[in-house]
Image: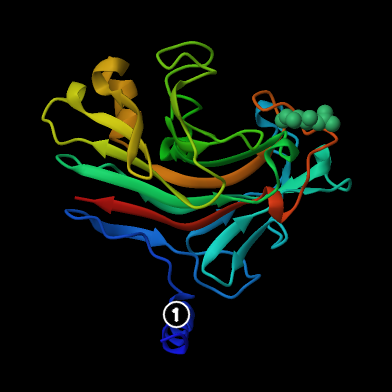
Amino acid sequence: MVYFPSVVALLALVSTAHAWDGPSYSGFKVVWQDSFNGGSGESPNSGNWNLITGHLGYNNELETYTSSTRNVQIRGGATVQIVPWQDGSVQGGWSSGRMESKYVFTPTAGGVTRAEAQIRFGTNSIDRKQGIWPAFWMLGDALRHGVGWPDCGEVDALETINGRLTGYGTVHCDVNPGGICNEGSGIGGNIGIPDQGWHTWRVDFDRRSGNWRDHSITWYMDGTQFHQVTGDRINNEGVWNRLCHSPLYFILNVAVGGTWPGNPNDSTQDGYGSMMEVAYVAHYTD
Ligand SMILES: *[C@@H]1O[C@H](CO)[C@@H](O)[C@H](O)[C@H]1NC(C)=O
């Protein structure tokens, strides 16, 4: 009984090494997902993702994004790793990764649309992550078609800063500064994260009601709700449309430094220990 199960377990590991899909949820079907199949050390599927490059200069962040597999790579176990490195040869002194989906989805009228990823963080201790800012989020596709930020709409499923075990979910909308979403803060909620290991981050867009004021966007970690914004709270149909009725795309990135987390300090460590690793990104409908 000792050997047989371990052989089975090994076979199971081998046979699932190329597929770590989003789970099936009763009443939902997967419309699109990337479970990051591929060989260890490869780039993510370029049919699915744009790898953003350069020093974007948002929020006073330091990182320069590159398309190098040093910063963004598939790991053999069917995940993608986004890895920040201290690098004196790039602007800001840090290189990192940011991937944006070519895939665009619109929350379905009359139903519930689910966006979900499973994520863990590198094992560096928390006091060695000052300035590290991983995120799984969505932007309104209008941004790619001439509409500015935050008018395009932004839905952040998960952000953490400085290694802290607090997950933030936020919407950004309307105008900056101020406006309906109180920019630059946005309308946010948060939840304690048990540990740096694998957890599931979900946003449900609920358009079941015939009345847009009753529509909602709801955030969950491992199935526990931690934030909700309704159409009624936004109280402006055009602004709500950008958040809950319009095409969105996925973003995975690790920023470094900037106004919110503050910059890295002498304790901050780079590399895999400060990475964000993602097992799948999935879009479901009911
Ligand atoms: C760096 O910042 C972290 C908080 O994020 C703190 O715990 C640590 O002591 C700081 N290290 C130095 C050298 O300032």
- Residue furthest to the front in view is 1
Q: Residue at x 21, y 54 (%)?
A: 28
Ligand 1 lies in which image quarter?
top right
**Residue matched to label 1:** 9
- In this view, 102 is above or below 146: below
Name the amino acid type tagged 1.
Answer: Ala
Q: From the image, which quarter does the N terminus lie in?
A: bottom left
- Residue furthest to the right in view is 88
Percent from the top left, x then y, of residue 65? 70, 47
Q: Along the line of sight, which residue is nearer the eye, 49 or 39? A: 39
- In this view, 121 is above or below 158: below
Q: Residue at x 69, y 63 (%)?
A: 69
Percent from the top left, x then y, of residue 8? 42, 85
- In this view, 96 is above or below 34: above
Is residue 49 left or right of 110 when viewed as pictured? Answer: right
Q: Residue at x 48, y 35 (%)?
A: 143
Q: Residue at x 36, y 38 (%)?
A: 220
